[in-house]
Image (tube, rainbow, N blue to C red):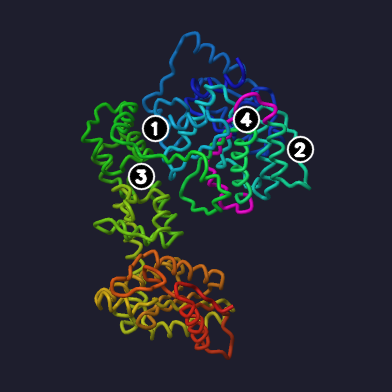
Amino acid sequence: MSVDKYLESIETVILSRQLSPVERLVLHQSWVGRTYTAMSQDSGYGNSYLKEIGSQLWEALSKAVGKKVTKKNLNLVLSEYLEKQTQTNVVVAIPKLAHPSPGAALAAKSPLYVNRPPVEELACAEISQPGCLLQIKAPRKMGKTSLLNQIVGCARDWNYHVVYLDFQETEEAVFLTLDKFLRWFCLNISRQLNLEPRLEDYWDEEMGSKVSCKIYINNYILKKIDRPIILAFNELNRIFDRREIVQEFLPMLRFWHEQAQRFKSWQKLRLVLVQSTEIYFQIKLNQSPFNVGLSLRLPQFNLEQVRELALRYGLTWLDNNQLKEIMAMVGGHPYLVNLAFYYLRREKILLEELLQVAPTPAGIYSNHLRGYLTMLRDEPQLKLALQQVVNAGENVKLEAITAYKLESMGLIELEGFSAKPSCELYRLYFRQQLGREREEKDRQILQRFSRKANKVDELTQLANRNYFQEYLETQWQQCQENSSFLSMLFCNIDYFDFYSKAFGEEAAATCIQQIGITIDDCVMRYPSALVGRYESTKFGVLLPGVDQISAVAIAENIRQSVKALAIAHDRSVYDGFPEDVLTVSIGGESQIPQQHFSSDLLIMAVNEVLVLAKKEGGNRVVFNS
């Protein structure tokens, strides 16, 4: 039996799961007697990292076969175990309480994998096409890696070569430079194909890394293999924040795909790109690999598929009404449904209790929900938009980019131009949690003003102009003593008189309140920050200890967040506005206060740039340089 066949048997018979790429590397190389040092030199992984992976793998194998497995004896122990299983024709079943933990990727042909037609059929058909490029997109925990494992299994059934690169396992050092990354990339391909790495024969500094990489793949790798090769990238989104690499690597993949239209050798290469959609990334359309080939977006389970999954968990007692109750809470989200079935199978919780506590911090979904809450705290404009959606009794129209980002995160569904929560779990949890954060902020404001009742603006419950100037004087002195930055913003609502005349005073007052809250939410993470209503439609923001770079980012976030509120003008009454919705113009200044200078100079400087922002058409941020 070949080494690859042994690895397949270890996955299906012993571990009942797919080996990760680095586990496959360690096991394959250990099977043929190579040392960790040799593996490290060839693969680019650290020596200690490979040893840690090996140690965990030997422990897992030892538990599975009931006998100690080490790097030295694995050939003997595992060969004997697999031979006995074959002779006795034993089918290794998953014990009642040993289902894979929900969220873990399912191996090819796993009994818990439920097809979502026509996704699997389309994917496997696509990889049979010469030079194809297949994309799999979905929010996190929607089953992307499990689908990729089914595709890889299909490719292996057809005797294709498979190279599997998972960017979740890649060390940070690999991303230091494009050259280092592409060398690591070529080394991985060579090792997974059991080819001797020959980078030095093809790499040429004068030609550059991309050209060297292309020549290595075309003139060495593709010439050495006699059948198609699936090059699968899992969690490709992990490189999106490495601008130097992603802006060169992604166009290179597209170029390789296009080469297959012209050159037969490139037709052996079949690309599969898997990415989470939470990260918003922009690349020129003519360079992106994401607008060519076949793109598959994973759907949620329907009722029939949820019923099938329940049967595979052995939950035969769940009737249609109970399944509908589960779906009423979590929709058909694969991970959320799997997690519910996992706990019900363990008989640790009743269905009624599970659903009752689901949207609370005590529920089984708490970790999943907290992860989203953390992401939202880093994106105030998204948090505000989601708060609108979960608090509304009907669908809400959102600004286009904001709607796209929230949909890509899996938090909302779009019906035309309107948004609603993607499931009741998200509506209930985020209504409670985001409302609680707002209440805590309001409590802090009230506490700050508890002895200063005449310092609060009656309409917005923010600081009024008197207290804003008083606080400015205090912070001016403190920042002067500490030689620290003091930043200040003025935010003025654009074309608000027309809005007020069109909709009336009551709507105008509500609008001012909403924009005031939005601005305040954008500085919530800065404990010394203060937002005040300085004039009728003009808000002041004080940011002690914040330098200009950070202040500009805060100002831009405020501008985007106000626009994302999507408070529309009435164009039937007035027309010709630069934007369809209300926006703000923002002027800003950052200084280290000096002796013998007054804070009035800061106010004058901020006012001057605010006027510039308004003159330039509004909906912009202008800072004194």
Residue 193 horizontal/vertical position (percent): 65, 28
Marks 2 and 3 sit apart, C-alpha to C-alpha, by: 51 Å
How many marks can you see? 4
Camera-side residue of 463 and 418 = 418
What amino acid is found at the position of numbered circle 3 in the picture?
A: Tyr
Left or right of residue 494, residue 292 in this image: right
Residues at discs 2 and 4 in contact (Cβ within 8 Å): no
| Residue occupying image coordinates x 37% and y 68% | 580
Residues at discs 1 and 3 in contact (Cβ within 8 Å): no
Left or right of residue 460, residue 193 in this image: right
Marks 2 and 1 sit apart, C-alpha to C-alpha, by: 42 Å
Secondary structure category for the residue under label 4 = helix
Mark before the other along the chain sequence, 2 or 3: 2
Q: Residue furthest left?
A: 321
Residues at discs 4 and 3 in contact (Cβ within 8 Å): no
Residue 262 horizontal/vertical position (percent): 63, 36
Q: Nearer the viewer, mark 1 or mark 3?
A: 1
What amino acid is found at the position of numbered circle 2 in the picture?
A: Tyr
Mark before the other along the chain sequence, 4 or 1: 4
Marks 4 and 3 sit apart, C-alpha to C-alpha, by: 34 Å
Magenta residues (range) = 222-245
Q: Residue furthest front?
A: 262
Residue at the spot of label 1: 118
Q: Residues within 10 Å of mark 1 (few under 14, many from 20)?
A: few
What amino acid is found at the position of numbered circle 1 in the picture?
A: Pro
Residue at the spot of label 4: 26
Q: Quadrant of residue 523?
A: bottom left
Residue at the spot of label 2: 202
